[in-house]
Amino acid sequence: MKYKIFHRRGREAKRIRIPFAFKTAAVYTLLFSLILVAVVVGLTSAYTTYAVRSQNLDKLASFVSGRYERPKLPEPDNPFGSRSSDFDADPETGLKSFAEANRIYIEIKDTDTGRITSYGDAGINVAGHMDTVRRVNAPARHLMIRVVSSDYPGLNGLSVGAFIALIVLLLLLSAVFGGVLIRKMLRPVYDMTQTARSITASDLSTRIDTVDSHDEFRELAETFNGMLDRIQESYEKQNRFVSDASHELRTPLSVVSGYANLLRRWGSENPDVLQESVQKIIEETGNMQQLVDRLLFLARADRKTQHVRFERFSVTEMMREIAEETRMIDENHRLTERIDDEVFLTADYALLKQALRAIVDNSIKYTPPGGDITISCREREGRVELEVADTGIGISEKDLPHIFDRFYKADEARTRGKGSSGLGLSIAKWIVERHRGEIRVESRPGQGTKFTVCLPNLHGPCRQEKEKAEP
């Protein structure tokens, strides 16, 4: 059976099976870790930068306020490049130069008079810039000195808003990257969807490739392919069943139609034609009835609506009945009985008898006149063995594995003129297996065939009720 395969890119390689849940968790853990590291690094850098700038601003403010608390400081105390003599000679010019050199804005307010004096670029004095305030109790006056830095307390020069925007950008990039990875991991699902869409009632040959998948999706794909195999097999069996059933019904219908036309033309004038036609019509009608009954039986078996009623009965009596009935309808063969006394079994009497009748009928059909048919029944080691052996034409080795298939017929030389529908042994096999038994066949062409039915000897009402409760 040939299938069309949807291949995915990549070469088959032996890799360790990694569960999809683990891979998904690993991807999201990695993305979360990267974002977390970026945030931690950013916040640490921002805090360090802020601490350094705040420390520098405090030094600048301390230096300015120190000019008013201690007007004359030694030269080494000025770490910012302005000479203290500049403040002594011209305080206005000295503060202005100091503010410009250090890119700060200085605002001095006399709290006694309310007078405010500022130095440096007024554009620095905006919301968001770092600032600090010092109170100075200078001789004869009280001052409030405010120093504003040109720096933002952000991340290496970035504002808080820019830092948040950077985090959002990282989240978006992580979402895109994660989406691409997840989509790649979900590729088998997309392939299965494509495969399912390509399946039609007339084409069930499509299968999904499992080469690149090494997780639960591989198992899912293999299960999906297995389901398609079963569906295709069931569909082909159904088509073959309908075709074979139509073929089997066509033959008796053609015979009935032919003899009906014969009756219409010469039946009223020729009594022999009338009798022969009526007899053949009755025979073919019986064949059709038997075929329809077997088809209905198999249909119920497939739907699991064929009931099995367990009861305890004598297998010895059943086998003797089958032997007696066989002698009544068949006088062309020698029938031998090897039936043990007092063999009992818990089973469905009617179904089991139907299965044995089908096997005996098969022996009658394929054993030449004058041949031997032997019916045996014995109990051994907790099981009952029912056996039908003949000296017929036998079954070839190539046909033996298929004799229980529905509508299966061996070569024409073996089946010509036998009137077999190919359903009797299929029904017998179903009945035996429904009783948890097995049916074995041994055959050699030209020497005969032996069917052996092995059934477990189930005793007691509890076992019987359990079997009834099972679907």
Image (spheres, rainbow, N blue to C red):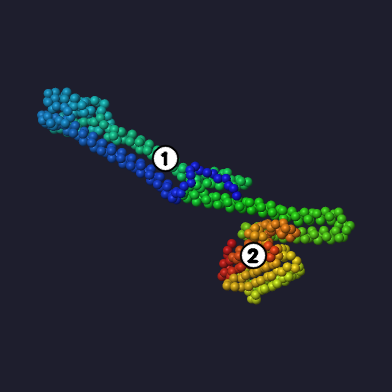
Image-quadrant location for residue 407:
bottom right
Answer left or right for 190 relative to 454: left
- Using the image as rendered, state which of residue 335 and residue 141 is in the foreground: 335
Q: Amino acid at mark 1?
A: Phe
Residue 22: x and y in percent read 42, 49
- Determine the residue positioned at 65% across, 60% down: 397
Distance of mark 1 from mark 2, alpha carbons?
66 Å
Binning the other alpha carbons within 10 Å of mark 2 as few (below 14), some (14 to 19) or many (20 upward) gives few
Residue 236: x and y in percent read 63, 51
Res 142 seen here:
no
- Using the image as rendered, state which of residue 5 and residue 431 is in the foreground: 5
Answer left or right for 269 relative to 425: right
- Determine the residue positioned at 49% across, 42% down: 9
Q: First in sequence: mark 1 or mark 2?
A: 1
- Using the image as rendered, state which of residue 18 and residue 104 is in the foreground: 18
Name the quadrant of the C terminus.
Answer: bottom right
Q: Label 2 near label 1: C-beta < 8 Å?
A: no
Q: Which mark is residue 460?
A: none
Residue 273: x and y in percent read 85, 58
Image-quadrant location for residue 350:
bottom right
Residue position marked by numbered label 1 in the rendering = 177
Residue 434: x and y in percent read 61, 64
Answer left or right for 432 relative to 60: right
Q: Which mark is residue 442?
A: 2
Image-quadrant location for residue 361:
bottom right
Is 285 above or below relative to 8? below
- Determine the residue positioned at 66% across, 73% down: 339
- Determine the residue positioned at 86% across, 54% down: 265
